[in-house]
Image (cartoon, helix red, strand yellow):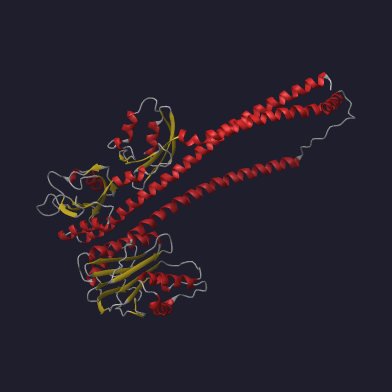
Amino acid sequence: MSGTDKSFSARLSLNILLITSVLFVTAIAVAAISSHKLIADEATKSAQHLLNSTIGDIEKTLQGVETSIEAAAWLVEEHKNDVDYLYHITSKTVEENPDIIGCAIAFHEYYLPGEYFFSPYSCVGSTGQIETMQLGTPQNNYFFADWYQIPSLMGEPSWSEPYFDEGGAKVLMSTYSYPLKDESGNVYAVLTADIPLYWMSDLLAEVKPYPSSTVSLVSRSGSFVTIGSFEELAGETLFSMVDRSSDKDKGLKEAAMKIISGESGVCRFSRGTKISFVVYGTLQNGWHAYMTCDYKEVLARTSEMHMILILIGLLGLLILFILCYLTIRRLTKPLTEFSASALSIAEGNFNTSLPEIKHDDEIKQLRNSFEFMQTSLTEYIRDLKETTAANERFESELNIANAIQMSMLPKNFPQNDRLGMYAMLKPAREVGGDLYDFMVKDNMAYFTVGDVSGKGVPASMFMAITRFMIRFTLGMGLPLNEVINRVNNSVCDGNDTGMFVTLFIGSVNLDTGEFHYCNAGHNPVVVNGEFLPAVPNLAIGVWPGFQYQEQVAKLERGTRIIIYTDGVTEAEREDKAQYGEDRLLKWANASIETCKSAEEACQSLMDSVHEFTEGNAQNDDITIMTIKIK
């Protein structure tokens, strides 16, 4: 090889190495930027999902409180002139809802003749017992409180700003206020529920995707409802915290404005030398939740990966340089000959030809097809993202509704030497209209199973209100038929939807075995393998003023009662055949000896229904309650 060839080989090797180095550095930079961006994007998505999950946990509790108060409003309207019963409503509301520490019915001035203040109020006292009092006094003038004024003026339910209750429960709280209106639409009272805020602090303090991450909750106006572990900021607002920040903190004001915008999203800002991001979202009651994270903590995991990648790349460059130099030395002669051929062609000697390069219409059509496919795919992905986001929001709301509904049903089934009880509820959709409830007090056991017409969210709301009214009315110690009479009149009043409830309610004296029951249009109850005789009363919500009849029977020890909804007897196979009452009685008789406990009997009947339907889709809500008198 001549000196010229060697020089050419060296220069070509250096040029290739230079080009490769540039490409390598570019690739490293692109990889670093892409990986940082990818990890940052994934971190924000993960933080948003975590925040949405936390919002769902908070809304589950808040919506449970709202549902309870809206149900109690029916009873207040029904008994607004019965002072003793109004105190009973506030006491029962606190007793039946562990999330509520105080409940008041704050009437307008002089609602009672000669009484400027009148507000029955019950709260959990320092000893843990429920205390009842008259809330309004000259020293505690509730007419000037926000929780009273805002719903009175606006005529809409609202959550108050956080405040410390001096006159009632003596804790930092927020109040849900529900305005009560007369026939003319004028507000005559405000029904309230007080909830403490400490549990939210405990919940948010546990949400830490990164060591310095915080989750905070602010009201509509930006006042901190809770701020995770930063207790020193309690009492401040989001904007006062921003005002206290230094000039080095950039973008905090913009982030604060986006947080209370009522939307969800992500925003970057700086705190001194740290660059951070905040994800934010809004609760259904108007409060705003947000989570802050530092990018330094998010991206710390990529540093080692980049160093390893650089070392591997440098080693690869060295090996590539050696291989290029050796290879080009071997290719110098062929390369020289190719250069000569190219020079010959340039001088006009066309005997030497180069491969022909084609660029015809087929290539253009192929390129256009690829461009069309790319555009179509982009539009499809955009539409799919929008549809998926909408479906996820809807599914999240249904999941919250299901969690609320299931949390309202009692789970502490009595199992003792005198009584065994168990119940199961399986909605046909995410939420349903079946209900069950029970209560054991002294020597009496009360129980009820009902089925609201229809399915889905409307039926579940109707179910919650009906269950709430039954519990309240049972607490007055009235006969069962009088309980159903009052509940029926309350349900019929303002029932514009035309919904109704079939219901079976019973009570057993555990000492004597005396069994009182009332069947309001419900399926026949099975007692020891036979249907219990029942007077054909109407379903609740059909006829206001209907007089329900109560019946009495004697139960011996060892008696088993099966109460169910029509989702059992009307369960269908694929061929449209139904489970039916005959098959139910056959199962009941066959299981008397095999199912010793109430839970075993309940699960056995549910399994029998599923086995019959052979995997066919459930077409109605299924509720089963089994009771064993020991």
Give the position of the C terminus as an image quadrant: bottom left
The residue shown at (44%, 43%) is 48
Find residue 138 and report its image quarter: top left
Q: Residue furthest left?
A: 114
User: x, y (%) of residue 471?
Assistant: 26, 63
Viewport quadrant of the N terminus? top right
Q: Is residue 358 above or below residue 195?
A: above
Figure label count: 0
Q: Residue at x 29, y 45 (%)?
A: 198
Q: Position of residue 98 (x, y in %)?
A: 27, 54
Foreground residue among 403 and 191: 403
Front residue (pair 461, 509):
509
| Residue 552: percent from left, percent from top | 24, 78
Up-down relation of residue 210 to residue 92 (above or below): above
Q: Is residue 576 above or below residue 345?
A: below
Placement of 469 over or under 191, stated as above or below: below
Q: Is residue 167 left or right of residue 301?
A: left
Horizontal placement of 134 versus 576: left or right?
Answer: left
Q: Does the image show residue 447?
A: yes
Residue in front for this viewpoint, 187 or 596: 596
The x and y percentages for residue 93 are 24, 57
Is residue 550 at all visible to an observer of this figure?
Answer: no
Q: Nearer the viewer, residue 271 or 432?
A: 271
Q: Residue at x 61, y 46 (%)?
A: 376
**In the displayed image of the protein, which residue is found farthest to the top?**
3
Whether residue 368 sits left or right of residue 142 in the image: it is: right
